[in-house]
Image: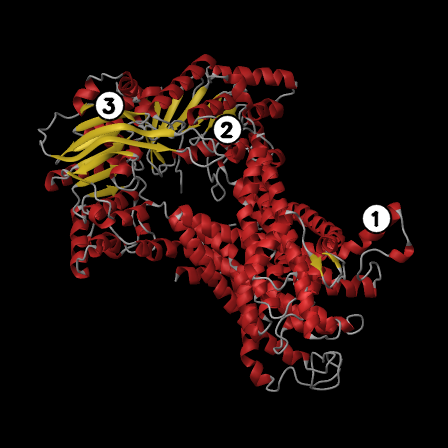
């Protein structure tokens, strides 16, 4: 059962946030209201009514788009790639009204103007791939609101967006809703977003609404233990008091440059500077956070340090010596924890083998390597007997633990963590962060921590470097940078963190 | 184990396995049921099926037993289908794996060769190979294998291209493991299921190519091949059409069996797509 | 302009493959036992060694392999395909005589397979796992498993021998001296069975691809968006699903063009059509290597041309390619 006895009301002109972790049934709820449940799912009991009329069958289809609009999570795939944006918006009037083409064209243009796209006439002629993710989401909003529906359903509309774009899109939804008196059902996993936008909140856990109330009530005095746990798991933007840092420089990056593109005779693509003269220092036993939005070059930096990419210029020194070229030698120095727990383990091999194979390639005997793997499993909070299992038998958080064990098995000098918690639910995320902190304290790990999430950075990093378009624009102790940002970009990043004034402030 | 279970519960797969099993059985019992040379003179030519209880599928224009040729032909079809498929799959995997894993110049060179083979109509190339190297059984099998590998290479390359970017492959690289380990232990096992499924298509193509070659009387004339018999039947098509008709049904059912088994394998190995 | 540039780039990329084919085949043919002169001598009923040597010198067969390869490639650049000793005229004109039948056959089969494959694939996908889907998919499997030459023979038995609706082979009745529409109609009757025979397996492949592609596109996010917009199912399929689902079909044409040309060898032989495929078969039997190489060259050019058109078509359908 995906949903169990879910009931709520949505009044005109209010924003109701349905919040929960993955598997809570929040997205199923949205689909059920649209009458767009995936095949295999059916409403077995209960009813949904709009304006006092119960929604049923064919009449439902006529209501969709017209009286209920919907915005989806993934702006990159939500628009038809082969159809111009203008034609996709115009379809709303074409199907639901009898307006003439000229009137429709005029209204399409006005709809795009209203959502604040930079060049509305150009956007009408554009194909979706010519727009950025944030722009596409604006198009989706324009389309969903085209016929001035009474209800707008937003299913995680900003989750796939960068934090500054997210702030803009949230503001847009707020403004449009206020202007038109639309009732908004907003599905999200992020309490920060809830704080930013909600009038009322419903918290879902495993298909059940466990708590419902005004935003103020739920955020400030949650009654249900699950709500309390979720809120407590949200990392605070305020950094803990600074620790004393060692003087030893375990990783030094000097003048790193990496340029992509500009290849081939007839291909004329603008070369992209992914890294532009980046210099950084990671101190032994500390965590250096690299924060920035997509395209800032933070992942390129991680891949260069991990030896997966070769930089065009600059040096990377580990413990004073330049990075060796050989794979074997580098393996002892740098290891990495990856972002996607579902892609970072080979589905066809036992997880213990995958942890033990590195030391074995270095010449360790199999029995000893397996014994160490078992010990590492216990160290990262897993059952030692789990080494014989396969990846699909573990949850996302457990897989990240295995990934950490695999990296630690090589006893590296530097651990690169590339967005290691961004694919995890907030409660699991808190556990993995706690594990990393605990391991650092026990093993003296030096961690280069890549993240887009400033809250996570505030909690785990000693120092932080802010990147924008391949360059480091500001760096320093995380408490200092976050409480007293110097660079305008850092300021705009911090200002965009949703719910910074309410949740975990 | 789970895949086998899924396979056996799928009616399509079971139907294919039954058809293919029947052809295999025919091939196995051929020397027992028809111990005499199937290409030797057996009786009066052109007797209709059922006319003479000794030849329940009749005789061909040379007075040979059609049923005997059918049973012995099953051995040839399976042999050619199996061995040629093996050759094509091995060449294809080697080309595709190297091109997909290493990329760059290796990829460009290997893919140009693959393109060259794909630009050339495969039956035309087969004709040229048979014309040059003769048409004994071994040559025909190798020639079919050489003609049929490019799609396997493309498929393997595509799989390698996506799989080599997986984080677990990067993790192994960082653990200091060799390219051989990466290719054989990490990437290939994950790339193999779609290739195995595609092997059924290659086998169907191989059987069709051989029968077409034999039909044109360009395959080995010294072995009883279904295509050959169809070609012989052409001369008497207007009156004794059964000579061509019967072996054609045999080819159709074998290929149907191979295709269904392939489809069953696909459903079993790629459960995500099974609902399609 | 961008489109043309893209297409030209793809065209240029196919040149290495073409050169590889020609060099590879030329070297391969050097391994062949017996050359054109041997075949010619056999046809003349034998002759002495001196005549053979003279003939070899005449055809340039006495030079070194490298020299002959160089000369051959250079002649190809100037579009001179050489001289067919068997037919007693330039290879180019032999091929040109045979080209129309093959082109008609191919285009007919392509059109039939593509349009019916698309229609059947759409119906099957719309009724997935219901009886129309089961019926169409089963038919597709059977078509796929049917050897084309056998289907052709059985079609001759049924339509030409028993029903006597259509001619059993050949390419137009010259003796009747038809002109205008009558001639076209006459040619068409000769083409019906060969086109169907050649198209059969491609129809099976096309309908399978179209069905799978439709099912995949139907599950995509933008189709969910279209539903959320309140569009009718018909409009969703017609305006959103179909065009996206067609992309793999277009790719398919390019991939299958070569296979189809190969298939024409068998089909033309079954229906005694005077086309390129039968010419290839005849020149293998007669060891007319010049003609065989010429056919291979022209076939490769045809395949490259088809792929050029496919690239343009694809870029027209998918704005992401050019942008």
* Pair 2/3: label in front: 2
Find residue A336 and report its horizontal and vertical position in percent. 24, 42
Question: If you read the primary sequence from the N terminus, does the residue marked by circle 2 or circle 3 appear first?
Answer: 2
Dot label at residue A128: 2
Label 2 crowd bin: few (<14), some (14–19), many (20+), radius 10 Å: many
**Res A200 quadrant in image:** top left
The colour scheme used here is secondary structure
What is the CA distance from the residue labelled 2 to the residue labelled 3?
43 Å
Mark 3, residue position: A221
Mark 1, residue position: C184
Residue at position x 66%, y 55% from top?
A: C294
Q: Is residue C197 left or right of residue A376?
A: right
Instruction: Assign a secondary structure to mark 1.
Output: helix
Q: Is residue A232 left or right of residue C167?
A: left
Depicted C228 relative to depicted C104: above or below: above
* Pair 1/2: label in front: 1
Dot label at residue A274: none
Label 1 crowd bin: few (<14), some (14–19), many (20+), radius 10 Å: few
């Amino acid at each position: 059962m995906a949903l169990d006895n879910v009931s709520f009301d949505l009044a005109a002109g209010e924003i109701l946030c349905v919040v929960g972790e993955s598997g809570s049934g929040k997205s199923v709820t949205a689909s059920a209201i649209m009458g767009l449940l995936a095949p295999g799912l059916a409403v077995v009991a209960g009813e949904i009514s709009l304006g006092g009329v119960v929604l049923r069958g064919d009449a439902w289809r006529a209501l969709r788009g017209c009286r209920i609009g919907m915005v989806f999570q993934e702006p990159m795939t939500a628009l038809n790639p082969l159809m111009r944006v203008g034609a996709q918006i115009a379809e709303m009037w074409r199907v639901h009204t009898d307006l003439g083409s000229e009137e429709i064209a005029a209204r399409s243009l006005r709809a795009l103007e209203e959502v604040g796209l930079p060049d509305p006439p150009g956007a009408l002629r554009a194909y979706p791939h010519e727009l950025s993710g944030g722009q596409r989401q604006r198009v989706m909003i324009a389309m969903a609101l085209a016929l001035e529906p009474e209800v707008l359903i937003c299913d995680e509309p900003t989750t796939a967006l960068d934090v500054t774009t997210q702030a803009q899109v949230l503001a847009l939804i707020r403004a449009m809703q206020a202007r038109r008196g639309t009732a908004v059902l907003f599905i999200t996993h992020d309490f920060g977003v809830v704080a930013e936008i909600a009038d009322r909140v419903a918290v879902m856990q495993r298909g059940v609404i466990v708590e419902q109330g005004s935003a103020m009530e739920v955020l400030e005095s949650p009654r249900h233990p699950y709500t309390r746990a979720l809120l407590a798991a949200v990392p605070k933007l305020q950094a803990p008091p600074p620790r004393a840092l060692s003087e030893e420089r375990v990783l030094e990056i000097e003048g790193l440059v990496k340029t992509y593109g500009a290849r081939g005779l007839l291909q004329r693509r603008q070369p992209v500077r992914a890294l532009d003269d980046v210099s950084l220092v990671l101190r032994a036993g500390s965590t250096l956070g690299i924060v920035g939005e997509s395209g800032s070059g933070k992942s390129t930096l991680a891949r260069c340090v991990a030896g997966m990419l070769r930089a065009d210029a600059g040096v990377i020194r580990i413990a004073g010596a330049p990075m060796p070229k050989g794979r074997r030698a580098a393996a002892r120095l740098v290891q990495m924890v990856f972002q996607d727990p579902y892609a970072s383990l080979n589905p066809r091999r036992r997880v213990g083998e995958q942890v033990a194979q590195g030391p074995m390639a270095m010449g360790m005997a199999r029995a000893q390597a397996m014994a160490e793997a078992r010990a590492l499993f216990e160290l990262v909070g897993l059952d030692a007997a789990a080494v014989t299992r396969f990846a699909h038998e573990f949850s996302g958080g457990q897989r990240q633990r295995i990934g950490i064990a695999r990296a630690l098995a090589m006893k590296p000098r530097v651990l690169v963590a590339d967005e290691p918690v961004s694919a995890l639910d907030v409660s699991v995320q808190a556990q993995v962060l706690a594990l990393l902190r605990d391991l650092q304290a026990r093993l003296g790990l030096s961690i280069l921590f890549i993240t887009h999430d400033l809250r996570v950075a505030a909690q785990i990093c000693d120092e932080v470097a802010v990147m924008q378009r391949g360059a480091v624009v500001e760096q320093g102790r995380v408490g200092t940078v976050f409480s007293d940002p110097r660079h305008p970009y850092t300021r705009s990043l911090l200002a965009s963190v949703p719910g910074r004034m309410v949740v975990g402030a | 184990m789970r895949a086998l279970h899924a396979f056996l519960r799928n009616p399509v797969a079971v139907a294919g396995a039954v058809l293919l099993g029947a052809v295999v059985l025919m091939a196995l019992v051929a020397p027992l049921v028809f111990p005499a040379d199937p290409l030797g003179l057996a009786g009066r030519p052109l007797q209709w099926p059922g006319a003479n209880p000794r030849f329940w599928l009749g005789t061909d224009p040379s007075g040979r037993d059609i049923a005997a040729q059918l049973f012995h032909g099953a051995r040839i079809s399976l042999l050619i289908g199996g061995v040629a498929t093996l050759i094509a799959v091995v060449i294809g995997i080697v080309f595709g794996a190297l091109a997909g894993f290493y990329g760059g110049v290796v990829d460009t060179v290997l893919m140009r060769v693959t393109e060259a083979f794909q630009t050339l109509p495969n039956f035309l190339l087969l004709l040229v190979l048979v014309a040059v190297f003769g048409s004994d059984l071994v040559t025909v099998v190798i020639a079919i294998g050489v003609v049929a590998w490019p799609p396997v290479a493309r498929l393997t390359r595509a799989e390698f291209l996506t799989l080599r970017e997986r984080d677990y492959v990067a993790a192994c690289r960082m653990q200091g493991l060799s390219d051989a380990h990466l290719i054989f232990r990490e990437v290939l096992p994950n790339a193999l299921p779609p290739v195995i499924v595609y092997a059924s298509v290659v086998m169907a193509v191989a059987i069709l190519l051989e029968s077409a070659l034999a039909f044109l009387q360009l395959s080995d004339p010294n072995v009883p091949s279904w295509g050959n018999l169809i070609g012989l039947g052409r001369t008497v098509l207007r009156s004794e059409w059964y000579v061509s008709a019967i072996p054609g049904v045999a080819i159709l059912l074998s290929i149907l069996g191979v295709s269904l088994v392939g489809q069953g394998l696909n459903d079993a190995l790629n459960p995500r797509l099974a609902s399609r | 302009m961008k489109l043309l540039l893209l297409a030209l780039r793809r065209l240029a990329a196919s040149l290495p493959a073409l050169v590889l084919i020609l060099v590879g085949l030329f070297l391969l043919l050097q391994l062949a036992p017996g050359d054109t002169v041997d075949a010619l001598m056999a046809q003349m009923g034998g002759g002495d060694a001196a005549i053979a040597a003279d003939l070899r010198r005449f055809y340039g067969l006495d030079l070194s392999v490298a020299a002959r390869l160089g000369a051959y490639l250079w002649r190809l650049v100037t579009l001179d395909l050489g001289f067919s000793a068997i037919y007693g005229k330039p290879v180019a004109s032999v091929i040109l005589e045979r080209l129309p039948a093959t082109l008609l056959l191919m285009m007919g089969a392509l059109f039939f397979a593509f349009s019916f494959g698309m229609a059947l694939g759409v119906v099957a996908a719309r009724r997935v796992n219901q009886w129309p889907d089961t019926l169409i998919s089963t038919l597709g499997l059977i078509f796929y498993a049917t050897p084309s030459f056998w289907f052709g023979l059985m079609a001759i038995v049924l339509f030409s021998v028993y029903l006597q609706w259509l001619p059993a082979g050949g390419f137009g009745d010259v003796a009747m001296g038809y002109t205008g529409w009558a001639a076209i109609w006459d040619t068409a009757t000769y083409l019906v069975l060969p086109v169907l025979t050649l198209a059969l397996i491609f129809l099976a492949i096309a309908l399978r691809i179209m069905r799978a592609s439709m099912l995949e596109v139907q599950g995509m996010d933008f189709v969910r968006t279209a539903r959320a917009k309140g569009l009718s199912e018909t409009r969703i399929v017609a305006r959103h699903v179909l065009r996206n689902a067609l992309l793999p079909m277009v790719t398919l044409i390019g991939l299958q063009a070569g296979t189809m040309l190969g298939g024409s060898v068998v089909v033309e032989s079954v229906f005694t059509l005077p086309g390129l495929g039968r010419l290839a078969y005849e020149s293998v039997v007669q060891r007319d290597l010049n003609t065989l190489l010429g056919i291979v060259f022209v076939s490769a050019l045809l395949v490259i041309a088809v792929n050029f058109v496919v690239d343009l078509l694809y870029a027209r359908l998918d704005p992401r390619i050019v942008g």
